[in-house]
Image: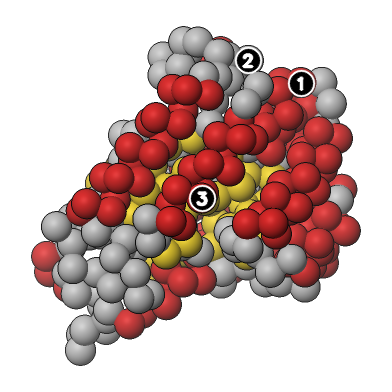
């Protein structure tokens, strides 16, 4: 069981909203569904008095700058999801990855005035060493990808190979899940059926129970365009948020996680695990 103080709470729940109109267009034929759904979602979150993290594509910020500005005005956090969503960062040249991150940061800043501190890498977090290096070079502190601190409950500082820089990567002890749809064929190995409100509610609430019992963090990724096509998902998401809050969670944000990792740094300048004992791995689960 973890002994982390999650900003005054015993456990954490992180709701990440992926704002990516290109995926909406690809799988529904209508890029506008993302905008409509985010507007509705902002109303729902305001009603519940909850603040969450919106993971925004740079190209979506360029297309809908007012929408991204509205997200920030409503008190929510924005961070990056890459510029275009295609292709994945992993395997691409360093200079190409760095250019995309610069474009992403500038596009989001132009839309809402926020210079993002983090990036949630697309394609289920596919990243490599050059991704970490590019992020560090452009001023991104937190890199959410499959590269994780194996034995840490919280984000941990990781040295970037070949440089004197470091970035924060997620801890590997949490649990994560995502909404889903049978419209994406490459998800068939995980979700062979259409979205099930009963199944999703049961699975996501069980994940929150696990986080509470182990004093760790659970995370859920929600795609606004899926909220528009999955019958019952809006109500499930609302029920899950209410359940997490009622159970006493801290609604985690990238900024809050960065603060948490900073406060845990020891005299050596790294997290409590220390540079000699910290280990990293490529997470095999999808979020």
Q: Is residue 223 visible?
A: yes
Q: Mark 3 highlights which residue?
A: 242
Q: Which mark is residue 28?
A: 1
Give how far across and how far down residue 102 sits, in percent. Answer: 67, 61
- In 3D space, how far apart are the residues under numbered discs 3 and 1 (Cα atoms)? 29 Å
Tag 3–tag 1 contact (CB < 8 Å): no
Give how far across and how far down residue 42 sits, in percent. Answer: 73, 53
Give how far across and how far down residue 118 sits, in percent. Answer: 54, 63
SS of the residue under disc 3 = helix
Q: Residue lying farthest front?
A: 246
Q: Nearer the viewer, residue 88 or 148?
A: 148
- Which residue sits at x=81%, y=33%? 33
- Which residue sits at x=33%, y=82%? 263
> Residue 37's quadrant in the figure?
top right
> Residue 230's quadrant in the figure?
top right
Q: Nearer the viewer, mark 3 or mark 2?
A: 3
- Which residue sits at x=46%, y=71%? 256
Q: Is residue 133 visible?
A: no
Count of all numbered marks drawn on residues in the image? 3
SS of the residue under disc 2 = loop
Q: Quadrant of the N terminus?
A: bottom left
Which class describes the residues within 10 Å of circle 2: few (<14), some (14-19), or many (20+)? some
Is residue 240 rendered to the left or right of residue 271?
Answer: right
Q: Which mark is residue 15?
A: none
Q: Mark 2 highlights which residue?
A: 183
Tag 2–tag 1 contact (CB < 8 Å): yes
In the rendered image of this protein, does residue 209 appear above or below residue 113?
above
In the rendered image of this protein, does residue 90 appear above or below residue 118?
above
């Amino acid at each position: 069981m973890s002994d982390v103080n999650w900003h005054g709470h015993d456990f954490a729940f992180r709701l990440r909203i992926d704002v990516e109109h290109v995926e909406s267009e690809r799988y529904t034929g209508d890029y506008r569904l993302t905008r409509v759904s985010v507007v509705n979602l902002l109303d729902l979150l305001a009603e519940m008095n909850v603040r969450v993290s919106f993971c925004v594509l740079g190209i979506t910020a360029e297309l809908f700058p007012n929408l991204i500005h509205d997200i920030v005005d409503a008190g929510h956090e924005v961070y990056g999801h890459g510029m275009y969503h295609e292709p994945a960062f992993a395997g691409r040249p360093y200079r190409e990855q760095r250019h995309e991150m610069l474009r992403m940061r500038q596009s989001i800043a132009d839309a809402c005035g926020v210079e993002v501190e983090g990036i949630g890498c697309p394609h289920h977090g596919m990243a490599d060493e050059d991704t970490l290096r590019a992020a560090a070079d452009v001023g991104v502190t937190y890199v959410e990808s499959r590269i994780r601190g194996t034995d840490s409950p919280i984000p941990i500082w990781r040295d970037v190979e070949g440089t004197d820089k470091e970035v924060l990567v997620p801890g590997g002890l949490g649990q994560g899940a995502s909404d889903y749809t049978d419209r994406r064929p490459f998800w068939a190995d995980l979700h062979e059926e259409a979205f099930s409100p009963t199944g999703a509610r049961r699975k996501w609430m069980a994940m929150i129970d696990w986080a509470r019992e182990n004093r760790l963090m659970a995370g859920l990724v929600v795609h606004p365009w899926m909220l528009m096509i999955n019958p019952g998902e809006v109500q499930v998401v609302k029920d899950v948020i209410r359940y997490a809050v009622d159970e006493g969670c801290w609604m985690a944000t990238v900024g809050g996680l960065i603060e948490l990792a900073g406060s845990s740094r020891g005299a050596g300048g790294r997290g409590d695990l220390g540079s000699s004992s910290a280990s990293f791995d490529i997470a095999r689960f999808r979020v």
